[in-house]
Image (tube, helix red, strand yellow):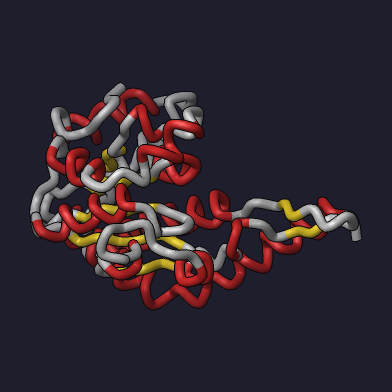
Amino acid sequence: MSAVDAYRAAAARLLEDTAQESAGLGRASELLARSLRDGGVLHVFGSGHSALPATDATFRAGGLAPVRLIHDPALAPWEPTRVSRIERLPGYGSAIAQLQDLRSGEVLVVISHSGINPVPIELAQQARERGLVVVAITSRSHSLAARSRHPDGLRLLDVADVVLDTRAPEGDVSVCLEDGTETGPVSTILATWLVHALAIGAMERLVAAGMPPPVLRSMNRAGGDGSNEAVLAPLRGRLSREP
């Protein structure tokens, strides 16, 4: 088997393993559906490469409209040296939280492969104190194998209401080449799937309750612009980077 085939097989197996998260996904989807029925917004956050799944859930064709990306330029994946330092700074996550329009009863998804750095942990803590439901998307195996950098020794999975395990391996590598090189990152693929699965589960529950889910359409399909304008109209002022 080639390394590429091994990578494909590993990613497919790990995606299949997320079936073991069905109970957590169901609970998180129900909590999100309840928030959406009450006019709430889904907040999403990740730093470094964990920002990619969060970004993919925002203003996404086929995705939920009421999604707000919590974005900090210093934590962007294209600033790796800066991210590696800042996400470890105690107090920075709390400062980010203080700048957000976080409302009781809403849902915050925090994505972190390791779940050991202060920034995502503090943001989750602040959100829970303000009455939000926190859903963590993280790798239990990596998180429990690594030493927490939080001053109190906490991990993201310790401060969340619901934990969704990506099942990504420690070190985020799934393939070993003949010379011992470890490669095959999978955390982004798995976290992205979990974020969209959470949203789809909430949509399904809204439909069952007789409420059309607030879903965006592709702007490159006929009627997409008008449909999106109607869905986004009640959300003006609450979403970041609004089109």
The answer to which of 129 and 204 lies nearer the viewer is 129
Q: Residue at x 39, y 58 (%)?
A: 116
**Which quarter of the figure has residue 154?**
bottom left
Which residue is at a point 30% across and 70% down the rendered structure image? 158
Q: Quadrant of residue 204?
A: bottom left
The percent position of residue 160, horizontal first and vertical second, equals 27, 66
Q: Position of residue 241 (x, y in %)?
A: 29, 25
Estimate the x, y position of residue 205 in percent, counting from the top left: 29, 64
Q: Is residue 18 above or below residue 222?
A: below
Q: Please indicate whether residue 242 sits to the left or right of residue 163 in the image.
A: left
From this viewpoint, is residue 113 visible?
A: yes
**Residue at the spot x=21%, y=45% of the render?**
91
Q: Is residue 63 visible?
A: no
Q: Residue at x 31, y 34 (%)?
A: 71
Q: Is residue 97 left or right of residue 82?
A: left
Residue nearest the observer in this picture, 150 or 178: 150
User: Which corner quadrant holds the N terminus?
Assistant: bottom right
Where is residue 7 drawn, in percent x and y? 75, 56
